[in-house]
Image: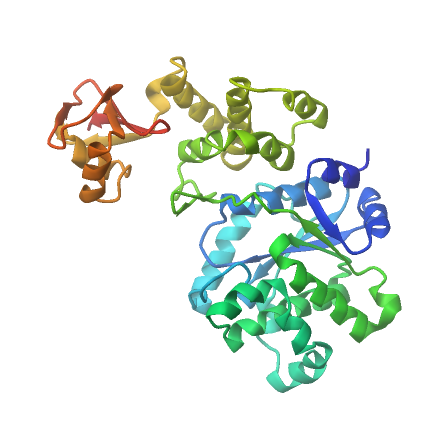
């Protein structure tokens, strides 16, 4: 089985522009491909996992990745999948975020001479002359076609700014620039990027002719139904300072039964033969599959030691085995604390009002005993396990 066939079986391919050519390129290690990352935060999230593991798989098969940092496009903001305009960031914010991305990507991709490379589209986009870009690129785009693009439809309902309207042109120009200067012959992106990606293919065809565009092809990774990276309104970050390794583990441990095998296929490097056997699992066996998923992904991001600690902590709470030493903890100066204060201090509740509501609704327990009194205090001199719902908990200890 070639890498292309493996990607298809793992459910990673949704649409392609020229399947026979794509198959030949990546199966023979001839692809130089790029994936773009806009620098909207100072850490990548779990939502970037599919792109990062995809780059790793293709590099292992001999292909050359280009990680494109969107230092220029981030100054505009991608309207895809948005109902409002993105926050405008300063150049300093964007540069800082780009540096953070580089460090995290290096855990997945091997950079260096003849290997993967990282480029920043600020290096070419920010130096463009507006009139020149209108003449060189603007003439290649039909406004009628752009308005029909899926990436603009949601924003059109509430108002699409002219700033955002230019995003497709900028992303298309990226592929055109990379094709000319880095021999990049393939681009990857999520399903919401299809229109933007086709724009790049069309721009190369118009500017460089049919012969040049023969190697210009797009491949789409399917993120439909895999809205990863956010839970309970909070992003799940790859930075351990923003999302602790244990919380990262628990995020994946808590995926829905219907999604766990799909996540294992798409995101882990377990052999397909092993995963095919897992597809037969049902009932309690799916909890084992979730544990495998959480362990494998935590190991990829935070290393084997942190993955082992998270696994032990999870088993101590949910399975009655394992060590509680690695549980997330909240420290206090006194041996007795109110449950409301503990919920807020441990970040299981964002406010005292929310903590009170959780207790009143029966969603809080201490040492497996449900808390019904909002004024209850708890003795933590020997440690106590505070639990919110079935899946979130913290060990309360005295400093």
Q: In the displayed structure, does residue 39 sit left or right of residue 322?
A: right
Q: Nearer the viewer, residue 231 or 121?
A: 231
Residue at image location 13% in from the left, 28% down from the top = 373
Q: In the displayed structure, does residue 232 sit left or right of residue 120?
A: left
Q: Against 342, is 16 above or below?
A: below
Q: Position of residue 171 (x, y in %)?
A: 63, 66
Residue at image location 60% in from the left, 44% down from the top = 50
Residue 169 picture quarter = bottom right
User: From this viewpoint, which residue is outermost toward the right?
Assistant: 211
Q: Nearer the viewer, residue 254 or 211?
A: 254
Q: Position of residue 23 (x, y in %)?
A: 83, 46
Q: Position of residue 327 (x, y in %)?
A: 35, 25
Q: Position of residue 118 (x, y in %)?
A: 63, 56
Any part of residue 76 in sight: no
Residue 183 picture quarter = bottom right
Residue 243 picture quarter = top left
User: From this viewpoint, which residue is outermost toward the top?
Assistant: 321
């Amino acid at each position: 089985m070639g890498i292309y066939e493996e990607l298809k079986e793992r459910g990673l391919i949704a649409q392609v522009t020229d399947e026979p050519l794509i198959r030949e390129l990546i199966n023979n290690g001839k692809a130089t491909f790029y994936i773009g990352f806009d620098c909207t935060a100072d850490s990548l999230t779990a939502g970037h996992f599919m792109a990062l593991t995809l780059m790793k798989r293709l590099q292992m098969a001999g292909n050359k990745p280009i990680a494109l940092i969107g230092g220029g496009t981030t100054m505009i903001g991608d309207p895809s999948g948005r109902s409002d305009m993105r926050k405008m960031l300063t150049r300093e914010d964007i540069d800082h975020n780009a540096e953070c991305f580089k460090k995290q990507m290096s855990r997945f991709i091997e950079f260096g001479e003849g290997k993967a490379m990282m480029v920043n589209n600020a290096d070419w986009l920010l130096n463009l002359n507006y009139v020149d870009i209108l003449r060189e690129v603007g003439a290649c785009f039909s406004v009628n076609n752009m308005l029909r693009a899926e990436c603009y439809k949601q924003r059109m309902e509430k108002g699409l700014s002219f700033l955002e309207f230019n995003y497709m042109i900028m992303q298309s120009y990226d592929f055109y620039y990379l094709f000319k200067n880095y021999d990049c012959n393939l681009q990857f992106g999520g399903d919401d990027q299809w229109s933007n990606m086709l724009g790049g293919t069309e721009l190369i065809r118009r500017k460089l002719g049919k012969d040049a565009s023969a190697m210009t092809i797009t491949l789409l990774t399917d993120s439909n139904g895999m809205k990863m990276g956010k839970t309970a309104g909070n992003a799940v970050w790859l930075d351990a300072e923003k999302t602790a390794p244990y919380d990262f583990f628990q995020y994946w441990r808590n995926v829905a039964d219907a999604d766990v095998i799909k996540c294992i296929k798409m995101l882990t490097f377990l052999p397909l033969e092993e995963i095919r056997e897992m597809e037969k699992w049902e009932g309690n066996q799916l909890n084992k599959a979730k544990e495998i998923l959480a362990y494998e992904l935590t190991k990829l991001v935070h290393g084997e030691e942190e993955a082992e600690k998270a696994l032990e902590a999870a088993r101590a709470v949910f399975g009655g085995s394992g060590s509680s030493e690695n549980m997330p903890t909240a420290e206090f100066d006194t041996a007795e604390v109110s449950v409301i204060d503990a919920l807020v201090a441990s970040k299981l509740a964002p406010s005292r009002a929310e903590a009170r509501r959780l207790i009143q609704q029966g969603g809080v327990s201490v040492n497996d005993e449900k808390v019904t009194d909002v004024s209850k205090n708890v003795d933590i001199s020997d440690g106590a396990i505070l639990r919110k719902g079935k899946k979130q908990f913290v060990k309360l200890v005295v400093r």
